[in-house]
Amino acid sequence: MTIWLERAEEQFPAFLERIGAEGDLDAAVAEWDTVHNSCTESTRAPTRDRQARDEAEPHAVSSERTW
């Protein structure tokens, strides 16, 4: 069975029925609306304020790699 992420809310109930899953269908379908791994301040592109602050306060960079 193929479930397209773009149509998961409408296709997921058929998948659950097909595998014989039991539980709260509404709660399971609602999980598709939950945002996971969203962008945080530390991973966003630098704003002008943050970029200016970073340029004013350079950070030390270690040449030693610890992989």
Image: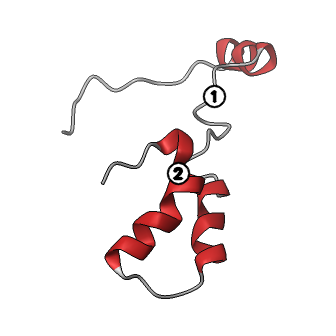
**Residue 53 falls in which quadrant of the image?**
top right
**Label 1 vs label 2: CA separation?**
28 Å
- 17 left or right of 49 in image: left
Q: Residues within 10 Å of mark 1 (few under 14, many from 20)?
A: few
Q: Which residue is mark 2?
A: 8
Where residue 30 sits, quadrant-wise, is bottom right
Task: Check residue 33 in the rendering and tell me which mark sits there, or answer none.
Answer: none
Residue type at mark 2: give it.
Answer: Ala
How far from the left and from the top, in percent, is residue 65? 22, 31
Q: In the picture shown, does residue 27 fall above or below 38? A: below
Say if 23 sits above or below 4 in the image: below
Q: Which of the two discs, 1 and 2, labels the residue nearer the N terminus? A: 2
- Residue drawn at (48%, 44%) of the image: 5
SS label for mark 2? helix
Of residues 13 and 24, the one drawn nearer to the viewer in this rendering: 13
Of all residues, the one furthest to the left in this rendering is 67
Residue 13 locus on image (x, y percent) = 52, 67
The residue at the point 18 percent across, 39 percent down is 67
Mark 1: which secondary structure? loop
Nearer to the camera, 55 or 14: 14
At 33% across and 75% down in the image, what residue appears? 19
Q: Is residue 3 left or right of residue 1?
A: right
Colouring scheme applied when the structure was drawn:
secondary structure
Depth check, front residue: 20 or 53 = 20
Q: Tell me: residue 4, above or below residue 63.
A: below
- Residue bearing mark 1: 44
